[in-house]
Amino acid sequence: TKGLLDRFGADRVIDAPMSEALIVGAGVGMAIVGLRPVVEIMYIDFTTLASDQIVNQAAKFHFMTGGNVKVPLVIRTQQGTGRSAAAQHSQSLETWYAHIPGLKVVLPSTPYDAKGLIKAAIRDDNPVMFIEHKGLYNLKGEVPEKDYIVEIGKANIRKTGSDITILTYSKMVYACLQAAEELEKDEGISAEVVDLRSINPIDDEQIKNSVSKTQRALVVTESNKTAGMSAELFARVVELVPNVKRVSRLAGKDVVIGCSPILEKASVPSVEEIKKTVMELLK
């Protein structure tokens, strides 16, 4: 947001009181009267304080008015491990919001996607949870100056392969890419890495096409295993490709994330775990 206040003025760039419910509620109000607000909640953990505004207002208002009112609201936040921020600043809660009809959920993994997806989110007539990973903030990549969007709901094949499909998103993309590259170099295994980029909607077509080709799939997420996105994606693979040979999943441990870097690192899937699981699926 550096420079935005000077460029656009205090009428458009507002330093809000530290009240998440107020911030999101004001954003909902702005959206339903025709503006396209972007509200920022520092950590996804704090969006729980605004959950009524997100779940019961933003996501439902369009439908409760018979489709007569749009809610073009973007809620920008961050989540995830990697900075020893401990239990109340490190959770991955994207699955909570993916469960809500009327609410889109996107998770960029590259600077290019971040720009394209935020532009798509702002132009969307629906509320969008725009979830960044704090562990990717130092990532650098080419971003065109020109105007472009990345379509919400379209996955990106980050690495093509023929032996197994790895479905993932956000920071886990990089662990999966490293695992895939090492497997190819050391074991001759060709893994296809699919970056979903959004989890509501989910690109079922890309999942079906990739898994139909490889006949094996591994889902990798940082969010908790129990009732998490890994379970949803596992189920979709089986539904979309009933004849799939083998499917497995790796997800965050069902634990409260510790401040210790050692404990934090142990709570999410590692490159070695991904490699080991892939090799087991190919036996």
Image (cartoon, grey):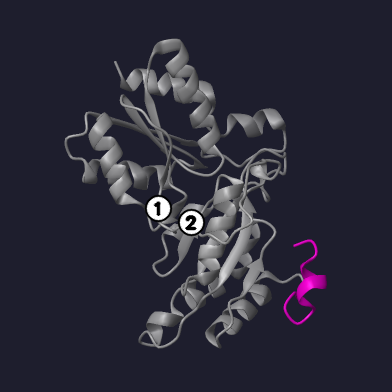
Q: Which image quadrant is residue 99 in?
A: bottom left
Q: Is residue 187 above or below residue 55?
A: above
Nearer the camera: disc 1 or disc 2? 2
Residue type indicated by callout 1: Lys
Q: Which image quadrant is residue 160 in?
A: top left
| Camera-nearest residue between 71 and 146 | 146
Q: Main secondary structure of the magenta part?
A: loop
Q: Does residue 12 show up magenta in the picture?
A: yes
| Camera-nearest residue between 145 and 266 | 145
Q: Is residue 39 left or right of residue 225?
A: right
Dot 2 crowding, Cα within 10 Å, few <14, some 14–19, many 20+: some
Residue at (56% x, 40% y) in the render = 171
Q: Is residue 92 above or below residue 73?
A: above
**Residue carrying label 2:** 150
Give the secondary structure at mark 2.
loop
Q: Position of residue 20 (x, y in %)?
A: 67, 69
Q: Determine whether label 1 and label 2 are within 8 Å by CB.
A: yes
Give the secondary structure at mark 1.
loop
Q: Is residue 120 above or below residue 198?
A: below
Residue 15 appearing in the image:
no
Q: Which residues are magenta?
A: 1-16
Q: Position of residue 212 (x, y in %)?
A: 23, 36
Q: Position of residue 70 (x, y in %)?
A: 46, 81
Residue type indicated by callout 2: Val
Q: CA distance from mark 1 to mark 2?
A: 8 Å
| Camera-nearest residue between 12 and 249 | 12
Q: Does residue 237 show up magenta in the picture?
A: no
Residue at the outermost left position: 243
**Residue carrying label 1:** 154
Residue at (51% x, 60% y) in the render = 149
Residue 123 appearing in the image:
yes
Residue at (63% x, 58% y) in the render = 77
